[in-house]
Amino acid sequence: MLQTKPRFQNFEDYLAYDDGTDNLYELYNGELIAVPPESGFNVGIANFLFAVFLPIVGYLRLRGHGLELEVRGEPRNRFPDLTIIREEHIQQIIRRNTIRMSMAPPLLVVEVVSPGELQQNRDYVAKRSQYQDLGIPEYWLIDPQQQTVTILTLQAAVYIESIFRDSEPIVSTQFPDLNLSAEQILRAGA
């Protein structure tokens, strides 16, 4: 029997859909696009940062790859590698691990850039624009290919970029007491 792919008229229809799996999907032009699993390298970096932020914000405010952000544009949702949510989000996302555009933005979103031009463009251009539009105060791009950690800080509704390499200490406006270098983060994926 041939099964047809579901189509969604809006984000609410998508949110009501359950295919009975734990698969993650991006909603693109009304259709579901499966989100592939992360590489072990990317997961290693995200797990390292989870451990770094754990004593700072506590486990309830840390979310891994399964947290979904509703965004404007296409796709209509994103699944960051690591997100630090606000205290108020804890209750708001109990039923579904989705931060809607009607909610306050998370404090920090981290993406580990996968190899390839498409992935670079997605993280550096498309996601940057969508996260800036949401008003996320800080967006980290960890790029193993370029050996950089780029921190985008929202100032007057526009991201200002700071790039860190090697043993340079990371400077975060959201978490000024961090004692962390670009090298430590990039080494964590190996």
Image (cartoon, rainbow, N blue to C red):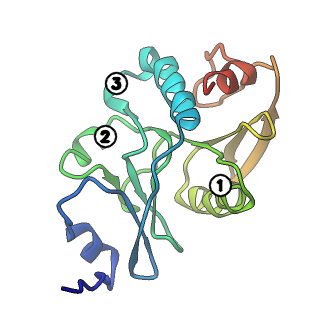
| Mark earlier in primary sequence (1, 3) | 3
SS class, disc 2:
loop
Q: Position of residue 37 (x, y in %)?
A: 45, 49
Residue at horizontal 65%, vertical 13%? 179
Which amino acid does the dot numbered 2 rest on? Glu
Tell me the tag on residue 88: 2
Q: Position of residue 24 (x, y in %)?
A: 36, 57
Question: Is 9 or 103 nearer to us in this picture?
Answer: 9
Q: How far apart are marks 1 and 3 (CA)?
A: 25 Å
Which amino acid does the dot numbered 3 rest on? Tyr
Which amino acid does the dot numbered 1 rest on? Asp
For the residues labelled 2 and 3, say whether their Cβ atoms are less than 8 Å apart: no
- Using the image, determine if residue 111 lies above or below residue 18: above
| Mark earlier in primary sequence (1, 2) | 2
Q: How far apart are marks 1 and 2 (CA)?
A: 27 Å
Q: Where is residue 154 in the image (x, y as percent from the top left)?
A: 66, 47
For the residues labelled 1 and 3, say whether their Cβ atoms are less than 8 Å apart: no
| Mark earlier in primary sequence (2, 3) | 3
Q: Position of residue 185 (x, y in %)?
A: 65, 24
Q: Disc 2 or disc 3, which is closer to the eye?
A: 3
Question: Relative to 145, is 133 on the left or the right?
Answer: left
Residue with the mark numbered 3: 59
Residue at horizontal 27%, vertical 38%? 90
Tell me the tag on residue 163: none
Residue with the mark numbered 1: 123
